[in-house]
Image (cartoon, helix red, strand yellow):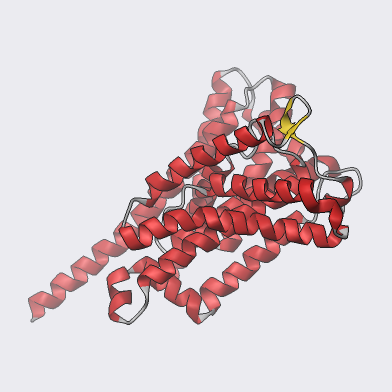
Amino acid sequence: MKNKGYMKIVVPIVSLLLAFLIGSLAIISVGQNPIVAYSYLFTGALGNIGSLGETLVKATPLIFTGLAATFAYRCNLFNLGAEGQFIMGSIGSVWFAIKFGNSLPPFISILVSLLIGAICGGLWGFIPGLLKSFLSLNEMIITILLNYIATLFMSYLFSGPLMEANIPQTAAVAESLKLPKFLPGTRVHIGIFIAIILAAILYYFLFNTTAGFKLRAVGLNQEASLVNGFNVKKYMFFSFIISGAIAGLGGAIELHGAQFRLMAGYGEGFGFDGVAIALIGQLNPIGTVIVAFLFAILRTGANTMQIATGIPTTVVGIIQALVIIFVVAGTTLVNQGSISSFLKNRKRGEAKC
């Protein structure tokens, strides 16, 4: 068990190093020095307060979608709909902020708006949770389709009922309803602290509570959980709702902290990046935060690297993809080793009998 826990740390680190190594070959192939390129990449993301702030802003929504995927995966549910849940949370939040935000004190309005975002995300997770738990339908297909519905619904709203004048976007949330910033001269808002606190709460819940243990047990072996009297359908159902609520809260925080309005392209890519982040983070909330920060570094520094060296930002996309491939492959190999050992020991036991 200790070796397996050790490998959960080693596999992502080795995967990251291999990805950067292969990325170096791509950089060399276009006639650039990879050391110089990577120095611009990290300087552009961490070199000063402004760039660090931008990295933290980009990490915040990734943490939420990563945590949403992590929570669902722990119950052996493949929630590929975090993007749709993120968008639905943003829709509920912007609707309240525009229609009723000024009727309450700002602090109360922000809290209510964030709560509505979490509820809308949870309701969007309710649909695949219900269909998976009680009708055994494929949750991956359902959640992907719901992503398209959420995106199209958002497009309808900012092009119709919530459109600002003749511009295809919603009105911005009021200045008093924007999340407070804490680093002068940057866009960093308190949403990053909410994300980290939520990760700590989820970690405690999953690994230090009875309910968290039962949820993980259902994820590991549903048949054994049923034999031990666990209500498997209930855990699956509520895992999807909570996962959706996490993503929806992330959408509300992104709206009030960074984007302030809905428009074309809002929330694009956050959901699938969240799935990758959860896998690389080994389905651990703390690991998810760390990997989300790494992805944000790559996103922020890519533009600086391109401007300074002319290397296209697609190289960063290649590195991200390679990290995912190596982590999945490495984790599979580690688990196969464990399975092989188990089968060998079982055969030895049968032979002795």
Q: Is residue 226 above or below residue 91?
A: below
* Percent x, y of residue 11: 47, 53
Question: In the picture provided, is 332 more to the left or to the right than 242?
Answer: left
Compare residues 62 and 9 and report the one nearer the observer: 62
| Residue occupying the point 51% across, 51% down | 280
Give the vertical position of 269 relative to 135 (above or below): above
Q: Residue at x 50, y 55 (%)?
A: 125
Where does residue 60 sit, x and y in percent of width and height? 69, 50
- Res 46 visible: no
Q: Nearer the viewer, residue 275 or 324?
A: 275
Q: Can residue 161 be seen by looking at this rendering?
A: yes
Q: Tell me if 185 is positioned left or right of 284 in this view.
A: right
Q: Residue at coordinates 86% horizontally, 52% vertically from top-left?
A: 102
Viewed as shown, does residue 141 lie left or right of 96?
left
- Where residue 39 sits, quadrant-wise, is top right
Tell me if 84 is positioned left or right of 231 in this view: right
Residue 285, x across and y down, in percent: 57, 62
Q: In this view, does 271 lie above or below 25?
A: below
Q: Residue at image x 55%, y 35%?
A: 152
Which quadrant of the figure contains the C terminus?
bottom left
Depth check: 309 or 169 in front?
169
**Can you say which quadrant of the picture contains the N terminus?**
bottom left
